[in-house]
Image (cartoon, coloured by chain):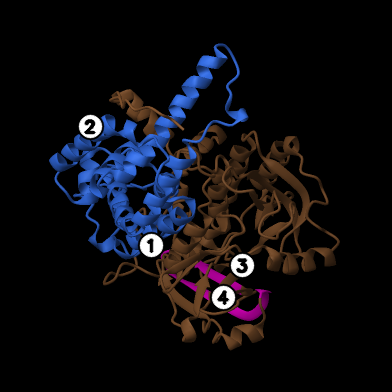
């Protein structure tokens, strides 16, 4: 529509202004697919399946992120931090973003919760009550005494979780998805320089979210083929660098929020404000806001290896966060009730919450709330769930 | 062992942008690198090839980085430069998409402003005219960028959109820094002189 016949030379400023305006307004990035694809690659090498079928291991549901990090089952930053979306799969160069709804989660979790008359949301979230409850939990934690292990005993940490996996293949309908149950167990010796044991057991339970078992079989799907995996190593260093022995030294590889060793735990501040500062310093600065801090706390708590005094300071530090949302009377996957608290994610319409027993300050699980209807999961629904128990046993491999 | 967690760059003698990727346990470091760089990379790629392809390329770039981590040398390259180098290779397969998007912008943005484009406040008429002028300039730039050589365009946009320094671009594209600067200079000079002639939405 412009009819200039005279073309003028632009100034540098005009060029820069046009450059900065060009294609500048794009949608808010949704990085969950890319992140899930990265984690899928980190977690498990691609498995070749017949007829171009590929299995995606999302591992979104595996809750034991830190010790599985350590033992190599689930290396890397936990996929469970992301919204209710499964990863991306590459087939023949094409890539599609998996938008797997929390449908399965709803099936399974709703079953559990409805059965107990404890639907999430029974207590409305009250932000202002959060810090009070956390301080109460902190107080309870301070009075709580961690079980003392006698020589030869083991701390036994067991988590039940549901993993969402998908398969993608050529031809209609192109992709199918299911959730499957995993049990992860860890035995930590009283003397942590002794042998630890870890075991991952896929129970084989499977619920199809997209498609049916028949469709999957027709597409050549033969199941995950994963039997139980088990390993033993001192200091929990199950996967030392190739050619080296397991190490008991604290390094960035073996210690941190995701891997809370005793020496690393000793470096944490005992003052809540200092603890919050430490959290802010250690957590990556990304688009998630303070939600990332809750994730880091959850990473540490999930290990079952954070002693009560440190847990108390962590709760006190979380209580300082202005945007913390708390939901009373939440059941975890194992049926224990607790208090859920978390911060709305700035990057995706979800809130990841830790669930603690307010009477003992014990961490008993996690869940993710869908804040907005997304990918088939209604607003307010629970899109992730897990339960964790920690007990003392007399022998490595003993379950009670 | 000294505690040199990559998540506390303050105590870390190694700059955070030069991580050691050679360890057997890349998960923690790649998780951090993804959180630090994915959004920026996605923003850059979305401006070049559109959001849909950008989503795929971000994923591809990080997967490629993960698979090729053993060739990454922190002594030679910052991670960001290396990552954008990988991404640049991927973008090259989508030159046609990039050009299509630029030409579409050249056509769309040179249409008259809609009623909602008016600006409130003082000097309304002048502001609207300015706004139209700016829109027209963006449209012309889009057309001109499509006419620029792919190499020059890449250096210009890595600078302007990704915010990479000439030294980083030299590493990303594996060309001498002097070449980067001369391409950048040439691209800017050419655009300043010629962009104005790309205003007419004449040809498809």
Q: Which residue is mark 3?
A: A159
Asked if labels 2 and 1 share a chain, the reply is yes
Please, what secondary structure does the residue beneath circle 2 have? helix
The answer to if A354 sits in the magenta stretch is no
Chain part drawn in magenta: A182-210
Q: CA distance from mark 4 to mark 1?
A: 22 Å
Q: Earlier in the sequence, mark 2 or mark 1?
A: 1
Check the residue under mark 1 and report the chain it is in.
B
Checking the image for residue B63, the label placed there is 1
- From this view, report whether residue A199 is shown above or below residue A364: below
* Residue A27 can be seen in this image: yes
According to the image, label 4 marks what residue? A174
Please give left or right for residue A250 compared with residue A28 in the image. Answer: left
Chain of the residue under the numbered disc 4 shown in the image: A
On residue B189, the disc is: 2
Q: Is residue A72 visible?
A: no
On residue B170, the disc is none
């Amino acid at each position: 529509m412009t009819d200039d016949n005279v073309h003028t030379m632009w100034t540098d400023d005009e060029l820069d202004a046009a450059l900065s305006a060009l294609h500048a307004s794009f949608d808010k990035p949704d990085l969950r697919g890319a992140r899930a694809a990265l984690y899928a690659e980190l977690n498990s090498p691609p498995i070749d399946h017949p007829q171009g079928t590929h299995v995606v291991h999302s591992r979104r549901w595996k809750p034991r992120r830190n010790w599985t990090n350590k033992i190599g089952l689930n290396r890397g930053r936990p996929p469970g931090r992301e919204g209710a979306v499964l990863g991306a799969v590459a087939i023949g160069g094409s890539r599609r973003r998996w938008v797997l709804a929390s449908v399965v989660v709803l099936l399974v979790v709703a079953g559990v919760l409805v059965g107990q008359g404890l639907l999430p949301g029974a207590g409305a979230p009250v932000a202002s009550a959060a810090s009070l409850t956390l301080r109460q939990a902190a107080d309870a934690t301070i009075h709580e005494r961690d079980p003392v292990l006698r020589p030869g005993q083991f701390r036994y940490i067991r988590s039940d979780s549901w993993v969402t996996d998908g398969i993608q293949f050529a031809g209609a309908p192109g992709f199918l998805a299911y959730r499957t149950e995993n049990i992860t167990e860890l035995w930590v010796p009283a003397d942590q320089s002794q042998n630890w044991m870890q075991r991952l057991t896929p129970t084989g339970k499977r619920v199809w979210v997209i498609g049916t078992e028949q469709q999957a079989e027709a597409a050549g799907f033969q199941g995950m083929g994963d039997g139980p995996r088990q390993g033993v190593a001192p200091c929990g260093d199950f996967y030392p660098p190739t050619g080296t022995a397991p190490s008991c030294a604290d390094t960035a590889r073996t210690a941190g929020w995701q891997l809370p060793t005793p020496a690393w735990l000793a470096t944490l501040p005992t003052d809540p404000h200092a603890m919050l500062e430490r959290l802010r310093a250690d957590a990556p600065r990304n688009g998630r806001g303070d939600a990332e801090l809750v994730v880091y706390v959850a990473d540490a708590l999930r290990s079952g290896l954070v002693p009560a005094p440190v847990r108390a300071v962590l709760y006190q530090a979380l209580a300082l966060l202005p945007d913390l949302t708390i939901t009373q009377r939440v059941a975890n996957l194992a049926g224990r009730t607790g208090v859920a608290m978390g911060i709305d994610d700035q990057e995706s319409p979800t809130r990841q919450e830790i669930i603690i027993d307010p009477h003992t300050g014990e961490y008993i699980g996690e869940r993710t709330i869908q804040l907005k209807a997304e990918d088939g999961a209604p607003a307010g629904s629970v899109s992730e769930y897990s339960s964790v128990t920690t007990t003392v046993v007399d022998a490595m491999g003993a379950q009670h | 062992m000294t505690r040199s967690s990559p998540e506390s760059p303050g105590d870390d003698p190694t700059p955070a942008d030069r991580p050691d990727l050679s360890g057997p346990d890349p998960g923690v470091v790649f998780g951090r690198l993804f959180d630090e760089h994915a959004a920026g990379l996605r923003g850059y790629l979305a401006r070049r090839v559109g959001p849909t392809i950008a989503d795929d390329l971000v994923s591809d770039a990080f997967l490629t980085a993960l698979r090729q981590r053993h060739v990454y040398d922190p002594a030679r390259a910052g991670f960001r430069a290396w990552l954008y180098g990988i991404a640049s290779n991927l973008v090259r397969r989508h030159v046609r998409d990039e050009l299509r998007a630029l030409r579409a912008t050249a056509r769309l943005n040179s249409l008259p402003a809609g009623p909602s484009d008016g600006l409130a406040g003082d000097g309304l008429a002048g502001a609207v005219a300015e706004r139209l002028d700016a829109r027209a300039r963006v449209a012309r730039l889009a057309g001109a960028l499509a006419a620029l050589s792919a190499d020059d365009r890449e250096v210009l946009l890595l600078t302007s959109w990704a915010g990479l320094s000439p030294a980083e671009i030299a590493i990303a594209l594996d060309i001498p820094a002097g070449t980067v600067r001369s391409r950048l200079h040439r691209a800017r000079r050419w655009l300043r002189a010629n962009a104005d002639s790309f205003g007419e939405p004449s040809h498809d």
